[in-house]
Amino acid sequence: MKTKRDFLFKSAKIQHLVFSRLELNGYVQSCLRDCQTALIEIGSESGSYALFGLLLVRGQLVNFYRYDALAIRLPPSEWFDFVGPTLPVFGVRTLAFTPQTLRLVKILLEQYCPGRTQVLSSGALDTAVRIWGKSIGPVLLHMSWPSADGLALLPGGGISPRHTLFLAGDQVFHSAGSMAALYGWKEADCQLRVYSSLAAGAAWDEYFLHHVFVWQVGHLLQRLEELSGRMLVNTIVREMNFAALAHDWNITISARSVTDQAMFFSPTQAGQVYQRLFEILQHHAELALGPDLFTMLLREVQMRLYAPYRVVYERYATLIKEQSPA
């Protein structure tokens, strides 16, 4: 008998809505029109189990899942064809997120194994985080208390947490890496589930590609300014931002930072978008420095990239190159 899947983050004080089939379609369309970034979970009228999940980013339906033993990706455009016939009445919970924290939720949804689980006192959480932070490759931590939930993405290799999420009642805290809300929660016992990127999967690959793009562009712009000056960097930044805006990719670049809040249907789509933006940087850098010097500079930056990220990047770089027209 198939095990029913719970709605995520039951500790969050989120209104449980009940819709007929027709009302459900209207509700999802209204969320899209309102440009929401959210997880919409659809299940039983009572809320005892969830059957489907929809990921919305800035009013775009990016991913659609059917919950079986795993969360199975299905074509987003066909979501209602799958959902409609399953139940006469649906229970729905909608949790709003930022694109960065929704990326963590996406990884959690797609885990191919239950993860390691340990129960520890809340006071021991910081020690556990330090230990898991030294893992080979990134890990996602899911912390559960009786009245709260938290997620933290640890990049691996001892690097500080990248993004965190904390939910308790009507409190939702998103952070670029601070663990303060999670460490500060005072309920005694914490159940910690650890999901390793070594298990692979599409959501993890998308995170790897996101991280590599942000790392690589940020470091190259810094080196290009040192070698050729701010004028070259300003030209690259202007054209990359223009391309991102023209295609509605939620990516913003400055001379000092790269803010990537884009999410994609698949890792291949992510790699293609990042490659198109990177080609703008490469074109201008090669004109200014010459192809040989730029290749040496790129190799220098990539060699500083943490190995697990470099492996995934090289795999998709090869795939995209093979798919490109001659």
Image (cartoon, helix red, strand yellow):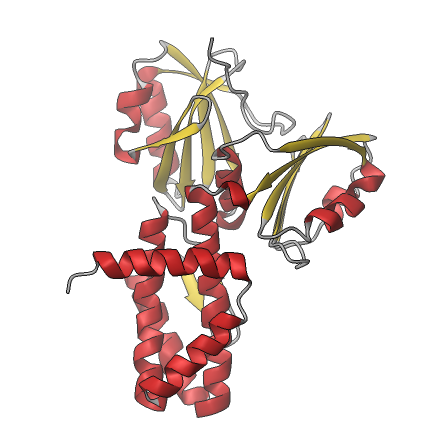
* Quarter where residue 283 is shown: bottom left
Q: Is residue 226 visible?
A: yes
Q: Nearer the viewer, residue 99 or 226?
A: 226
Image location (x, y in percent) of residue 178 = 69, 53
Front in this rendered view, residue 145 or 321: 321
Question: Residue lying furthest left in this view?
Answer: 326
- Please provide percent x and percent y for residue 40: 45, 30
Q: Is residue 218 visible?
A: no
Position in image of residue 65 (x %, y %): 39, 30
18, above or below 248, in the image: above
Where 143 falls versus 296 (above or below)? above
User: How many marks are shown on the rendered structure?
Assistant: 0
Residue at image location 32% in from the left, 24% down from the top: 25
For the point 53% across and 15% down, the residue is: 47
Query: Which residue is rendered at x = 29% and y = 24% of the image?
Result: 80
Front position in the image: 171 or 41: 41
Task: Identify the residue at horizontal 78%, vertical 46% (top origin).
Answer: 126
In the displayed structure image, the side of residue 142 where residue 129 appears, left or right: right
Q: Is residue 123 above or below residue 191?
A: below
Q: Quadrant of the C terminus?
A: bottom left
Q: Nearer the viewer, residue 184 or 320?
A: 320
**Where does residue 240 sit, x and y in percent of width and height?**
35, 71
